Amino acid sequence: MKKTIIYIVVALALTAITVYQLKKNKETTVNRVYQYDKEQPINVQAITLKLESVKNDVSYTGTFEPNKETRVSAEIQGKINSVLVDVGSTVRKGQALIQLDNSLLKLQLQSIEIQIEGLEADVKRYTVLANADAIQGVQLEKSVLALKSAKVQKATLMEQIGKTTITAPFSGIVTAKLSEEGAFAAPGIPLLQITDISSLKFTVNIPEQEINQFETNQQYVLSADAYPEISLSGKVIMTGSKANMGNSFPVQFSVNNTDDLKIKAGMFGNVLPTAIGMKDENEKKLIIPASSIVGTNIQPQVYLVKNGKVRLQNITTSNRFQNKVQVSSGLSEGDVIISNGFINLFDGANVSISK
């Protein structure tokens, strides 16, 4: 009986010690956990909005491409007798570039001309005899048909002889020589490459948020990296309908080259997103840092400071200028918005603005 009492006392003591230790551990854990005070001011940085004169210095890099470029090949096969131009030669539309061997064709042409001469004599003779009923009319008809056939053969040979002289399809510069004298030409085998750079195409890739800065048929200022002092005018002729892997859209300009064709195909250049003739370039606008915007692209928001508290304010944006955004509605000059210190910030929080 005495032992039973001792066991009970020991069990109760161990239970009491365990309960005490658990309570103590709970108090220690609670003391260590950070208890956030929502009423405590959050330290932030803010800016006071004012109207700014915006000069858009952003430019987009692109590449100049030839207006027209083609590889010239022969329409008929034959040996190349002479190449009349070289790489770098300036050619006019219709100018002779390559001469193929046409000696056999000319011999065939002479043979046909002799046949035509004889047939024409036959037709004259048979006409006189047929009118005198000295021969049957069928003989005259055969001679007339033979003469027509010979003339068709002559026209065919003259066409083939004409095609032995390969001419420039348009004015431009020879940018590649792909064959030499003595080589064999055949349809589909390139012989020369001609490039027209009197006018150029200039293509840039524009992010989707900024593509609205370029309008079709508007003129924009371009320059080539190699000649930054030369100002060119480019007209938007195409805006891509499908984005590339970087979610950018191609925008293509038509550009007239300088008189001395300084701008070459393949050169890099830049275009400013301000259309020529825009009158509001120096108009003052409300500009905020892009980093101060929270929310989504569909509904951008900023934290607006009022009487030491912040509230989320819906805004509408228009143009972007690198790391800045133009606000078209939702804010006014003199408003104070949070620019840094968004951690733990929430709608209605008290804030302390750092200087």
Image: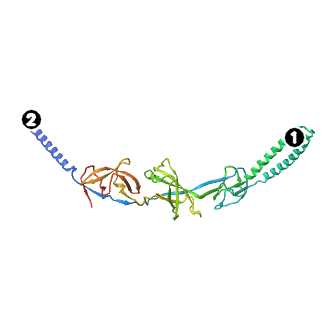
Q: Quadrant of the C terminus?
A: bottom left
Please say whether residue 340 is visible from this viewpoint. Answer: no
The amino acid pointed to by label 2 is Thr
Colouring scheme, one of rainbow, by chain, secondary structure, one colour: rainbow
The amino acid pointed to by label 1 is Leu
Say few, some or many: other residues with alpha carbon within 10 Å of mark 2 (under 14 / 14 to 19 / 20 or more). Answer: few
Relative to the observer, which residue lies in front, 345 or 234?
234
- On the rendered structure, is 201 left or right of 80? left
Q: Quadrant of the N terminus?
A: top left
Q: Position of residue 334 (x, y in %)?
A: 30, 58
Mark closer to the chain start, 2 or 1: 2
Give the residue drawn at x 60%, y 54%.
68
Residue at mark 2: 4
Q: Position of residue 167 (x, y in %)?
A: 69, 55
Work out how far the residue at label 2 is from the one at label 1, CA to CA, in angstroms.
151 Å
Task: Classify mark 2: helix, strand or loop.
Answer: helix
- On the rendered structure, is 339 left or right of 169? left
- On the rendered structure, is 349 left or right of 87? left
